Image (cartoon, rainbow, N blue to C red):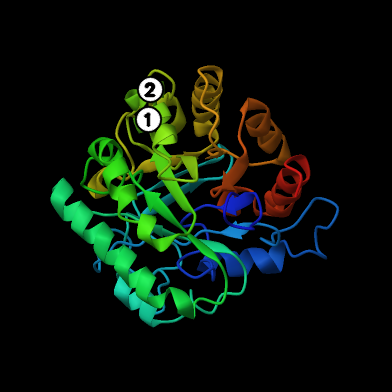
Amino acid sequence: MKGLKSKVVFAASGTLNFFGEGWPIHRLYKLLFGKWKVRRLGWFDFTGSTFVSKTTTLLKREDGMPLTDELQPKKMFPDHVRVYFRKGLVLNSVDLSGPGAVDLLMRNKWQNRTKPFMISFMSLGKTLKERLKEAAFFASLLEVSKSEFKAPFGVQINVSCSNTEYSTKSMLKDSLAILEKFQRLSVPIDLKVGVVDAIEAGVEFIKEIEASGLCDWLTCSNTIHWGEMAGQIDWQKLFGSTESPLKHLGGGALSGKPLKPIVLDWLKNVREKGVSMPIKAGGGILCSRDVRDYIDAGATAIEFGSVSILRPWNVQSIIQTGNELLGR
């Protein structure tokens, strides 16, 4: 990607936790789907992809899935996640739980990474003024510690987490002002938007983002909150009920197979309407064929996530296909 000599296939924010260590289920997958066990089919290995950290907020946030001091779920199978393997989808209410940006930087794990990567951040102030203040403070933290980083890094400004109590629609509207706070870093900047918000904002707003020059590329991916896009997602058919199995946790948000046609339609539309900026896209990428479909629709980079839970043996083939087709 522009300004960052990284791979063009990205493991989405949250896929590999805050520092790339992954999640407890991944240890099991490595045993079951290691390279030498399923070599003919592909294997569970993230080599060749660019790591994006789980999204952090400025302050400690305990809502959502409880974490240990080692930033792992307190339960092997968290109550906040429902996985439907046969249907190729996940429903989660994980939220942005984490220790906060200061704690993460003090652990010195980002600083000691040796390959290019992205740090994902989301401002969660109740007002624009508060969000801008948080963004400026986080940018200053990174600026002070930038010389300690062994590898090049970029910053992903996430305005797409649908599991918080805040309106992502208003965050997207304010994203240009937030992006301005990170220009002082002189590192690659990525703006991550949710597909529902991107559709509602319209192509003209995407063109405004492109014209601003405040981010090096746009990412369209992430989850869709329970009940949204009812015209394209048959929630009743998927879950056998109009009531979310995670209703007690706010309803949760959907990832996996049903997202693919929605993101593809958005991507094709913005390309047809003249948007030429680099776009990293994902949603429902479960096999190498899905990678080809995204590239054919106009993606300049690929982001995958739920496949690491739903089809772990396909992870390496997805990475290889993306890098091959995008010339890396």
- Residue 162's x, y, as percent? 32, 43
Examine the rendered structure and indicate whether residue 246 appears above or below residue 243: below
Q: Secondary structure at mark 2?
A: helix
**Foreground: 171 or 99?**
171
Q: 190 and 106: which one is in front? A: 190
Asked whether, in this view, residue 186 is left or right of residue 35, the answer is left
Instruction: Identify residue for label 2.
Output: 204
Please state the horizontal and vertical placement of residue 34, each as a whole percent of the image.
Answer: 74, 65
Residue found at x 81% / y 50%: 41
Quadrant hosting residue 296: top right
Query: Circle 1 — which element?
Result: helix
**In the drawing, what numbered circle is on residue 194?**
none
Q: Please tell me which residue is depicted at 33% across the width and 26% down the height of the picture.
A: 201
- The residue lying at 30 percent from left, 47 percent from top is 163
Disc 1 and disc 2: Cα gap in Å? 6 Å
Q: Is residue 68 visible?
A: no
Proximity of marks 1 and 2: CB atoms separated by less than 8 Å: yes
The outermost residue toward the right is 40
Q: Looking at the picture, does residue 155 appear above or below residue 214?
A: below
As rendered, which of 287 and 53 lies closer to the eye? 53
- The dot on residue 208 is 1
Residue 200 seen anywhere in this rendered image of the structure? yes
Image location of residue 297, percent across then percent down: 62, 26
Query: Disc 2 residue type?
Result: Glu
- Amino acid type of the residue tagged 1 in the rendering: Glu
